[in-house]
Amino acid sequence: MTALFHDIIFGPIHSRRLGLSLGVNLLPTDNKLCNFNCIYCECGWNTSGMRPQFNAREEVRRLLAEKLRDMVAEGTPPDVITFAGNGEPTLHPEFEAVIDDTLSLRDALCPTAKVSVLSNATMCGKESVRRALLRVDNNILKLDSAFDETVRLINGPQGAYAVATTVERMKSFEGRLIVQTMFLRGSYNGQIVDNTTEREVSAWLELVAQIAPRQVMIYTIDRDTPDKELQKIPRPEMEAIAERVKALGIPCSVSA
């Protein structure tokens, strides 16, 4: 069963990719707010007709400070402070200011912690978002396919979206990013879903080489998904894709 995050600060949880992670949710706590509608999203489907609402910068800062102080006092500071939650965090109108607050709190209270943002990369054309992402430790941007039609099927972008535009924006970070990709197969609305075919993987690898990120993270389904016809990719297949990334000279981690 898919589930929302009902708190602004959630966790800590043991992330497959990031370690002991304290989550920050800038989106509503009672519904999802995203400009993607991914068929694998653990938060479920987008809710139509909802007015965009964001958690106030001041409240995020206050609650994050409280939680960090508690964790440090208990001797269990987080490995990472992760912006994720119920949708796309970079949609927040004060995203850059929130990142400024977070970096200041991190430096003052738990300087060993990293700050990570999990984003679908759609807002990277906004200069304030770009500046903020360049300041965090882990700028993790989604690229699930090299083909627009596959992205439309898997990610359900709301409004205009082009892989070519996204790739150009990723390239502009000049390596200061991590590419994250979900591999899966199955069916959705009677259409075959599979971004592990040779056509898909070869084209994706070409784009990864162009983007030249400092790292690639590939993963597969681990939690409940809104579309119940999806399948997890076996680890040996994931490892084979990772080896092809490493052959490009780019480190690649696998969560499967």
Image (cartoon, rainbow, N blue to C red):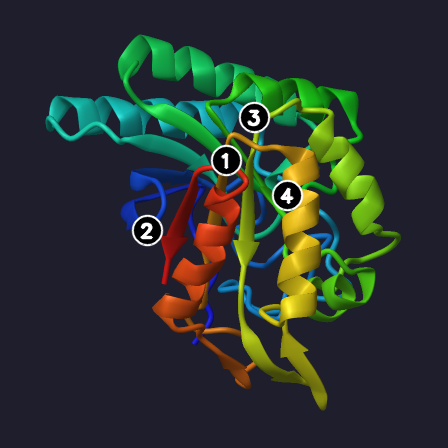
Question: Which image quarter holds the C terminus?
Answer: bottom left
Q: CA distance from mark 2 to mark 4?
A: 22 Å
Q: Nearer the viewer, residue 230 or 20?
A: 230
Q: Which mark is residue 16?
A: 2
Q: Is residue 3 above or below residue 98?
A: below
- Disc 2 or 4, which lies upstream in sequence? 2
Kind of residue sitting beneath label 1: Gly
Circle 1 SS class? loop
Kind of residue sitting beneath label 4: Val
Q: Nearer the viewer, mark 4 or mark 3?
A: 4
Quadrant position of residue 26? top right
Residue 92, image x and y in percent?
66, 35
- Disc 2 or 3, which lies upstream in sequence? 2
- Disc 3 or 1, which lies upstream in sequence? 3
Q: Residue at x 36, y 68 (%)?
A: 236
Mark 2–mark 4 CB contact (< 8 Å):
no
Circle 4 SS class? helix
**Residue at label 1?**
249
**Residue at label 3?**
57
Q: CA distance from mark 3 to mark 1?
A: 39 Å
**Residue at label 4?**
208
